[in-house]
């Protein structure tokens, strides 16, 4: 299968939360590949219990079904890698490299998480970028992780990229790549209605996230805005 856009999502819901609007504006077929898409090897986590799940197996099964509904709303193909939802640093994630190697062409745009607010996201970002090195993707971009990125008071304004530039994940990536903030994305009412449907597909996550981030699915609200950075290697960006 040849996709025009590949979104690397560390967990179920990260892609819909962060780039549903970007996907709605994208041309050609797209796929969301969730990296930590398998059942945990042991009992459910405290977060899973907070979401109402009784076992790791139930968590994986129900969240996979939620993700399928969200992908259908977004018109994206669903791929879930069978890695358990455990700290990503403990995993090699070779399957992610294999997936990208098989799926990336010179016409492919790949979106990876910036890693703001979640260590798993930063690990997945780095593993994805390592795999993408030399593959010749048409464009590689990092997306602001939502709802975490919305914690900066400048979120939703032209100053958001500048405010986030001081966060450690952004500083770390800026040491490896030249980052160019893309024009901020502000969803119109139609786009927000589509994104809201996708986000609400992850019903098990809404109440726990609302405890931390308040009315994050309100309109207007933080999820109405999305932010991307284009990545360019320093060697490629330097003049000959």
Image (spheres, rainbow, N blue to C red):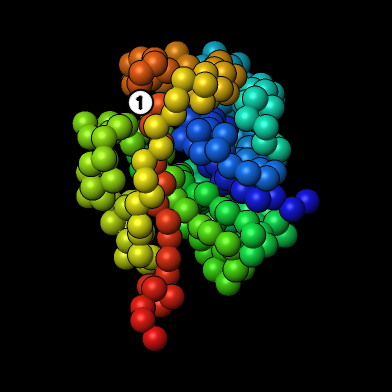
Q: Quadrant of residue 237?
A: bottom left
- Looking at the image, residue 40 lies above or below residue 176: above
Point 35% across, 26% down: residue: 222
Residue lying furthest right: 1
Instruction: Compare residues 31 and 44 and report the one nearer the observer.
Output: 31
Residue 45 visible to the viewer: no
Using the image as rendered, state which of residue 190 and residue 116 is in the foreground: 190
Q: Residues within 10 Å of mark 1 (few under 14, many from 20)?
A: many
Instruction: Tell me if residue 192 comes above or below residue 94 in the rendering.
Output: above
How many marks are shown on the rendered structure?
A: 1
Q: Nearer the viewer, residue 174 or 27?
A: 27
Locate residue 86, reporting x and y percent: 53, 40
Can residue 163 be seen? yes
Percent across and percent down for residue 129 are 51, 60
Which is nearer the eye, 57 or 213? 213
Left/right placement of residue 57 relative to residue 85 reads right
> Residue 63 location in percent, x, y?
63, 25
Residue at 39% x, 15% y is: 218
Give the quadrant of the C terminus. bottom left
Q: Secondary structure at mark 1?
A: helix
The residue singled out by tag 1 in the image is 222
**Residue 104 in picture, x, y percent from top left:** 66, 59
Rendered image quadrant of residue 226:
top left
The answer to which quarter of the image holds residue 210 is: top left
Residue at the (42%, 18%) spot, across then down? 217
Vertical relation: 210 (above or below) 158: above
Q: Is residue 201 left or right of 206 when viewed as pictured? A: right
* Residue drawn 32% across the image and 61% down it: 174
């Amino acid at each position: 299968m040849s996709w025009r856009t590949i979104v690397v999502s560390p967990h179920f819901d990260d892609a819909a939360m962060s780039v549903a609007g970007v996907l709605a504006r994208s041309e050609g077929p797209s796929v969301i590949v969730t990296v930590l898409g398998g059942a945990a090897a042991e009992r459910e986590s405290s977060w899973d219990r907070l979401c109402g799940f009784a076992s790791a197996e139930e968590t994986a099964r129900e969240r996979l079904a939620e993700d399928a509904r969200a992908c259908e709303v977004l018109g994206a193909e669903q791929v879930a890698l069978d890695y358990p939802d455990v700290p990503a640093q403990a995993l090699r994630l070779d399957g992610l490299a294999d997936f990208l190697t098989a799926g990336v062409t010179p016409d492919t745009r790949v979106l990876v998480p910036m890693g703001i607010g979640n260590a798993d996201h930063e690990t997945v970002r780095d593993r994805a970028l390592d795999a993408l090195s030399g593959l010749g993707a048409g464009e590689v971009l990092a997306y602001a992780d939502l709802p975490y990125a919305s914690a900066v008071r400048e979120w939703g304004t032209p100053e958001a990229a500048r405010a986030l530039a001081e966060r450690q994940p952004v500083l770390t990536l800026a040491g490896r790549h030249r980052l160019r903030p893309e024009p901020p994305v502000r969803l119109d009412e139609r786009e927000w209605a589509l994104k809201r449907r996708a986000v609400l597909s992850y019903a098990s996550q809404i109440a726990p996230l609302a405890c931390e981030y308040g009315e994050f699915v309100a309109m207007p609200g933080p999820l109405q805005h999305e932010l991307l950075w284009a990545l360019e290697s320093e060697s490629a960006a330097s003049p000959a």
